[in-house]
Amino acid sequence: MYYFGSKDALMLHVVEDVFGELGARVEAAACMPHEPVDRLRAYAETYFTHVLEHRWEVAAALDIVLSHRGVDGVPLYQMVDEEDTALLRSILREGLESGVFRASSLDAAVSIVEGLLDLTISSARNATDADLTTLSREIQEFLFRGLGAEPFSTPAQ
């Protein structure tokens, strides 16, 4: 049984629980492969699978992130730190440094990849009838081609 001292505490718990589970699944999947392309593919596929399996929970957590502020008044969606992107950053850094991904700013690559992945979450929230399976496949294709990691293929096709 849980007790929350306030509505805000409950809301923060929901966000931490939903996105914490997503992060844990992605981390477990992306740490198995050794090559940057394979690690990023595992990261993306696990991210998409989790959003598909937990569509409504993720959409609800996104609503909270977009509408609430932290104790210091900062909107929750602006409260991102290096830890939130550490795994993705390490995968992209390795791929950029090894030349597997086309030359790019690491910060730009992280922001772009995060934005593409998060499109599935915003689509789950904003378009309840969106075909997230097709969208996820198209995002992944766009992502890998943009990074110069062609030829693109998905194992499940």
Image: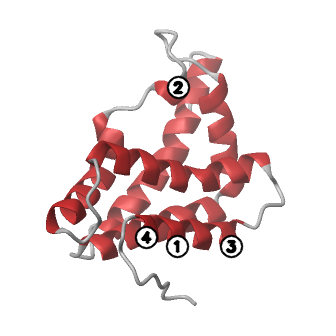
Q: At 43% from the left edge and 64% from the top edge, which residue is drawn?
A: 146
> What residue sits right under mark 4 in the picture?
144
Q: Is residue 97 above or below residue 149?
A: above
Q: Is residue 129 above or below residue 1?
A: below
Tell me the crowding category of disc 1: few under 14, some 14 to 19, or many 20 or more residues within 10 angstroms, Cα based.
Answer: some
In whole angstroms, how far apart are the C-alphas of marks 1 and 2? 30 Å
Determine if residue 1 is in view.
Answer: no
In whole angstroms, how far apart are the C-alphas of marks 1 and 4? 5 Å
In whole angstroms, how far apart are the C-alphas of marks 4 and 2? 29 Å
> In screen coordinates, is 95 left or right of 144?
left
In whole angstroms, how far apart are the C-alphas of marks 3 and 2? 29 Å
> In screen coordinates, is 74 left or right of 37?
right
First along the sequence among labels 1 and 2: 2
Residue type for callout 2: Leu
> What residue sits right under mark 1 in the picture?
141
Q: CB of mark 1 within 8 Å of CB of mark 4?
A: yes
Tell me the crowding category of disc 2: few under 14, some 14 to 19, or many 20 or more residues within 10 angstroms, Cα based.
Answer: some
Tell me the crowding category of disc 4: few under 14, some 14 to 19, or many 20 or more residues within 10 angstroms, Cα based.
Answer: some
Single out the mark in the foreground, 1 or 2: 1
The residue at the far right in this view is 129
Image coordinates of residue 77 in percent, x first then y, are 53, 29
